[in-house]
Image (cartoon, rainbow, N blue to C red):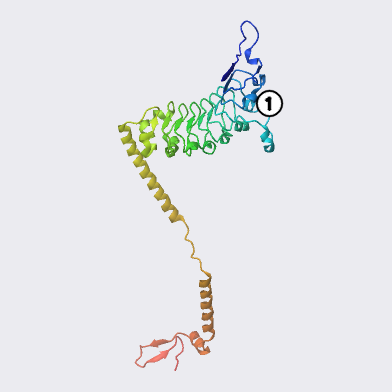
Amino acid sequence: MSCQIVGSPDSFGTSTIKTQFLSFDVSFFKSVEELELDCVQMNQITGIDNLKKTVRRLSIHRSLASIREIALSSLTEIPPSSNEWLISTWKFVTHLDLSKNSLHLLDESLKLFCKTETLDLSYNLLETTIDHLQHLHFLQNLNLSNNRLHDVSDFNARVGNIRSLDLSCNELITTDGLSRLYSLITLNLSSNKLDSIKNIESLGSLPCLENVSLKNNPLTRIVDYRIRIFAVFHNRAKDVWLDGQMPDQRELDRAAVISAMTRAKQNEAAQATMLVKKVLSPTKPIPLSSSLLRQKSNADMKSMHVASSCPSNLLIIEKQPDVVLDTTSSNTTLSTDETNIS
């Protein structure tokens, strides 16, 4: 069973009544599985809590400024963790569509939709870091298109198990934060501000990625754009569809050449870096073990003992002037530097 409540900002007929301000009581619905609210005032909807036990698909448009308006319903804030059990969650909702609202951020009440598998947040006003998505452990499909996002640097830690991600029509200039979404299969990055092949190289590390859309980005004006994109995926290029088209054999052949050249340059750079580190690294002193230290000490002691036991006359001889043999005379004599020794 489905329930749809649609209001309007315009007056009803010739009256001054605007249906978006009318109150509705949904508590008498006992088996609603699909609920859609469009252009209504959330504070005018009563009995929402009764639907948490049955609703599996929830859609709300043109009605929210924050998620807590629907997540908490009758409550104004989430109580301390010790009392969280007092809150009834939307534990059966697997599809949550909050598109076309006025959401500037995601608050912690999002975790009350703990079983959500598909989340649509398109056509909102999201600009900064997308928080609290890490609480949706079953999330597989996420639509963030038509927002104002310019940074996805921490997506790896927030939506690690996601399979489909739509980031089209935002203000992204790089994809670095997507490099570890290893379960990702479909990625839409069309209509962003990606202007360089380097800005999307991180996508080449995604082992399951099969569908990529990069339409209406500045980089699509680069010569041989498709070939250079396929080269990013190296041996997986044949498995990737780009902008709705699979690569032809000519693109695969040329991409393979570019990929090989790129890897060769990377290997050369890595070897050069290792060589520089080896040259610049200081030579480590050889540590002396305790046994070697004892041997050295014993050797020094023996040397001192020998010196002290030498005869005194030997010590005196060492201090005598150098003796020179004078062979210029027929009579062989011994002479010192200044005094003859007879």
- State the SS at label 1: loop
To which quarter of the image does residue 280 belong? bottom left
**Nearer to me, 185 or 282:** 185
Amino acid under disc 1: Ser
Q: Which residue is mark 1?
A: 74
Q: Relative to 46, does residue 16 appear above or below in the rendering?
A: above
**Nearer to me, 135 or 248:** 135
Residue 202: percent from left, percent from top = 45, 38
The quarter of the image holding the C terminus is: bottom left
**Nearer to me, 186 or 327:** 186
Residue 19: percent from left, percent from top = 63, 13
Residue at 53% x, 89% y is 312
Residue at 61% x, 31% y is 112
Mark 1 Cα shell of 10 Å, populated few (<14), some (14-19), many (≥20) = some
Which residue is most to the top? 14
The quarter of the image holding the N terminus is: top right
Q: How many marks?
A: 1
Q: Is residue 180 left or right of residue 70?
A: left
Q: Is residue 226 left or right of residue 80?
A: left
Residue at 39% x, 31% y is 241
Residue 32: percent from left, percent from top = 59, 22
Residue 182: percent from left, percent from top = 46, 38
